[in-house]
Amino acid sequence: MRDGYGRRIEYLRISVTDKCNLRCLYCMPHDIRSLPMKEILTYEEIAAIAETAASLGITRIKITGGEPLVRRDVCRLIGMLKKIPGIKQVTLTTNGVLLKEHLEGLMAVGIDGINISIDTADPKRYERITGSDTLGAVLEGLTEALRYHIPVRVNAVSLDPAFFAETEAEHDPLKEAAALIELARERPIDVRFIELMPIGAGKSFPGIPHDVLIPLLLKRFPALARDEKKHGNGPAVYYRMPGYQGSIGFISAVHGMFCDSCNRIRLTAQGYLKSCLCYDTGIDLKEILRSSLPEPEKNRALAAGMEKAILCKPKAHSFAKQENISEKHAMSAIGG
Ligand code: SAM
Ligand code: SF4
């Protein structure tokens, strides 16, 4: 369906847990308390919402978290979603730590693609960011996923290396980006840089704005040329590097201001349907699902609630004005 500004909403991100096996500094504060399991939607409840969403025109679903692979039997949910009429694609975003051991299960239920979050190719810096010495396991998972011929993309939040640097030489933001771009040289994967958004701990963390990073990268790699090929339906802008198998993408969530073409809504692990990352506007679908309404009425209420949330989707984010950001949750609770 279309929202109040005529945008076609066809993409739903579903967070299946607020728990995570990493503690990325800009995403998940160390002292964060996870929700009791009874507050989290069951797989059956998620599937009921996804069915209603499909009836309203949602065709693609991304499973996220927290870390989705820490929730028990997440492949069962993916299998349930894949069977919903109208749902054409179910993909996953993961930190990749547990990916290798889940690949067979993910293949068996027909996963359509996997995004792996890797913010740095430097193991020491990776540990500093995530609190975990697991870059090797993540890269193994990536290599193994390619062996299964699953479409893979790498997402890297553009962090300011000055925060981690111990010497002047380590301040160079291009060194970090260049090492990540290397991942696309001999692998058919897109490496995408994501602008840090001022949500949760991201508010007080130093990122590199893309209006700074992109010109620097284009100067350093003059061979980078715009790639007009369609890479999905998201807002990334792509470039190609001659001789590289994958492309380089930029998701400039703050400076890009691509709200005019926004096509997505988000379901938190607690069952709150959010219409924009920046604000807390939306609807509590868990309340409807767990109400005492008889089944047909419950389904009607679910559809009506979702329609209303979509119609009231805000026109644009307001990341430039922190006082306007009403979203107070950590990104790990929302799903990114
Ligand atoms: N744990 C999974 C992962 O890391 O991919 C899924 C959840 S995580 C919240 C989804 C994505 O959001 C990750 O790529 C993460 O880097 C990104 N993210 C978290 N906080 C962010 C922020 N403040 N700005 C931009 N991206 C952020
Ligand atoms: Fe966990 Fe993903 Fe957040 Fe890192 S970005 S703390 S992996 S949810």
Image: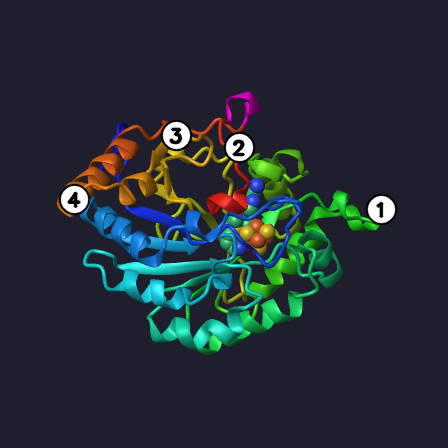
In the rendered image, residue 324 lying in the magenta stretch gets the answer yes
- Residue located beneath label 2 in the image: 328
Q: Residue at x 50, y 67 (%)?
A: 245
Q: Amino acid at mark 2?
A: Lys
* Above or below for 303 versus 139: above
User: Which corner quadrant holds the N terminus?
Assistant: top left
Tell me the CA gap for discs 1 and 4: 65 Å
- Residue located beneath label 4 in the image: 294
Looking at the rendered structure, the secondary structure element under dot 1 is helix
- Residue furthest to the front: 292
33 or 6: nearer the viewer: 33
In the rendered image, residue 158 lying in the magenta stretch gets the answer no
Foreground tag (3 vs 1)? 3
Q: Are marks 2 and 1 in contact (CB under 8 Å)?
A: no
What's drawn in magenta, residue-wise?
320-325
- Residue located beneath label 3 in the image: 281
Q: Amino acid at mark 4?
A: Pro
Tell me the CA gap for discs 2 and 4: 34 Å
* Above or below for 271 versus 21: above
Q: Residues within 10 Å of mark 4 (few under 14, many from 20)?
A: few
Q: Earlier in the sequence, mark 3 or mark 1?
A: 1
- Residue located beneath label 1 in the image: 168
- Residue furthest to the left: 296
* Residue 92 in sight in this render: yes
* Residue 230 in sight in this render: no
